[in-house]
Amino acid sequence: MADCKVTSKTEWPELVGVKGDVAVTTIKAENPSLDVFTIKKGTFITKEFLSDRVRVWVDECGVVYEAPHVG
């Protein structure tokens, strides 16, 4: 049976508490094929899952408050 484990990272809990722009840069450096951007807390978003998107949720101070993840 083939080993089918995923080698790409899909979540970045270590980025909670850092500035949003730093988080975006870090994620893009690890995987340039992802579409990564910040979203301010309280912003309306669509709920569809996209395997090449990472939303970086930031608070009013621009700090990541939720672990960014693919979706």
Image (tube, rainbow, N blue to C red):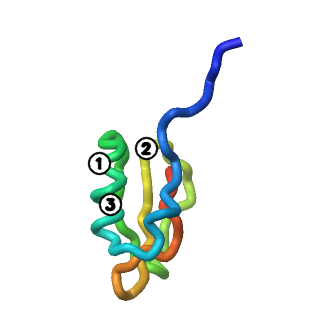
Q: Are marks 3 and 1 in contact (CB under 8 Å)?
A: no
For label 2, the SS is loop
Residue on which disc 3 sits: 24
Quarter containing the N terminus: top right
Residue on which disc 1 sits: 29
Work out whether residue 47 or residue 41 is closer to the camera in this orientation and state it. 41
Residue 20, x across and y down, in percent: 34, 71
Alpha-carbon distance for marks 2 and 3? 14 Å
- Residue drawn at x 48%, y 57% is 12
Residue on which disc 2 sits: 52
- Indicate the amino acid at tag 3: Val
Check disc 2: other Cα within 10 Å, few if <14, some if 14-19, many if 20+.
Answer: some
- Disc number lying in front (1 or 2): 1
- Residue drawn at x 45%, y 71% is 57
Extreme-bottom residue of the structure: 60
Residue 24, x across and y down, in percent: 32, 60
Q: Is residue 20 above or below residue 1?
A: below
The reply, left or right, for residue 27 in relation to residue 10 is left
The image quarter in which residue 21 lies: bottom left
Lower sequence index among marks 1 and 2: 1
Alpha-carbon distance for marks 3 and 1? 9 Å
- Residue drawn at x 55%, y 53% is 48
